[in-house]
Amino acid sequence: MRPEICLTLICSLILCLVCSVVSSGVSVCSTDGMSIRGGEYSLSNGLNVGSELLYHCPDGYYPYPKRMHRCLGHNRWSPSPSRRGSECRVMTCPNPSLLRNGDVSPVQSQYVVGDQTTYGCYDGYTFAGSASRVCQSNGRWSGDTPICDHGSGHCRDPGVPPGAKRHGNMLDIGDRVTYECSFGLMLLGSKERMCLEGGDWSGTEPFCYSKNNYDTPEEVSKYFSTSLENRLAISGLGDNTDGQQVQRSIQMRQGGKLHIYIALDTSGSISRDNFTVAKNCVEALINQISFFEVIPRYGILSFASEVNEIVDIFSPSSHSDMVLQKLNNVTYGKLNGTGSNLSRVFKKIHHKMAVFKERKELEDTQQAILMFTDGKTNMGGSAEPTVIRIRNLMEEIHGINWQKYLGKINC
């Protein structure tokens, strides 16, 4: 997935929300001094107020110091351009040099695209993961986290992802390990994991990302496959669900329902190519879900300054075959708009949920919201009040532990 697209998967509910305010007016901006060394830029709405200047770099590079500037009028950009100008810098990968009970080669202060590392364990330890990894153009290491395991614990050593530190060495039932990322990196995944009776670790494997990292389509596909297998499990009416297991999956009872709301950002800051990638991802996801026993209902929306309903979740044709047919007819040109109103799309989704609640059709229904957006919004005010209402609705239906059912894909 390209970095211009924010792809967030919500299993039960997670919300992608980044709000910004833009000035209004009629004055224009100038592109003098706005070029970028090693790359190029595009404008979402010419040099008009509110237009976004977006930098583009070759594969394996990222814009520095900023990726985007917005025209405020009177030849002012936000954020203000650097006096030293902008440039495309080579992507770096998190430092992988910390391998418990093993060696990493070569040891460097920085690892850039194309750098390769190899791993080996000390005597008495069994190696798992990838023995060789390459720093990829998206700032992620290829392969899987290398692990050196002694075999003496109830659970296998969970390893340490590149760029992270781990606290905790005990690997028996109930033991916990916690992770933190190096300065400037963000932790995605589980900050704390516990060794379970079945020999697995609770939660999901953590990763450390920089703000310039993104997921490739192959990584997204892999995540979807694993996530769906874990989260759309069907349990019988008489099954007992262990408390720790609930944290790892949404256990749906026989006859349980699933509602999936999907919103596609079509505002001016979204390019045609990125819209196509998002649309293809939605189609692939719907096809993947169709292999599971659960048959969800879909509500498909697009949003810019207004919200367009592609598939109404109340419609009898809101199941996969008809949804795919309607989605296939959607084109970028018909939906594209200049502004972005995240508040309005959340209000639309909340209204649908509230109607289902009045019909008493939410008690046995899991909810999912998928947002395909770059996270920018300049219309409609803050979406936070609506987000809070959705959260309260989920808590009322599923109890205070509804936030256990979370999963995310980086962008």
Image: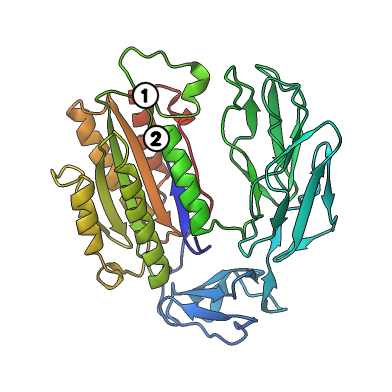
* Residue 59, position as x, y percentages in the image: 59, 72
Q: Is residue 127 above or below residue 7?
A: above
Residue 51 horizontal side relative to residue 365, left or right: right
Q: Quadrant of residue 359?
A: top left
* Residue 51, position as x, y percentages in the image: 44, 74
Which residue sits furthest bottom? 32
The residue nearer to you, when weighing 68 against 264, is: 264
The residue nearer to you, when weighing 166 against 16, is: 166
Q: Secondary structure at mark 1?
A: helix
Q: Which mark is residue 398?
A: 1
Q: Disc 2 vs disc 1: which is toward the camera?
A: 2
Q: Quadrant of residue 179?
A: top right
* Residue name at image x 43 percent, y 27 percent: 402
Q: Amino acid at mark 2?
A: Ser
How crowded is the residue under tag 2: few (<14 C-alpha within 10 Å), some, or many (20+)?
Answer: many
CB within 8 Å, label 2 to label 1: yes
Q: Quadrant of residue 86?
A: bottom right
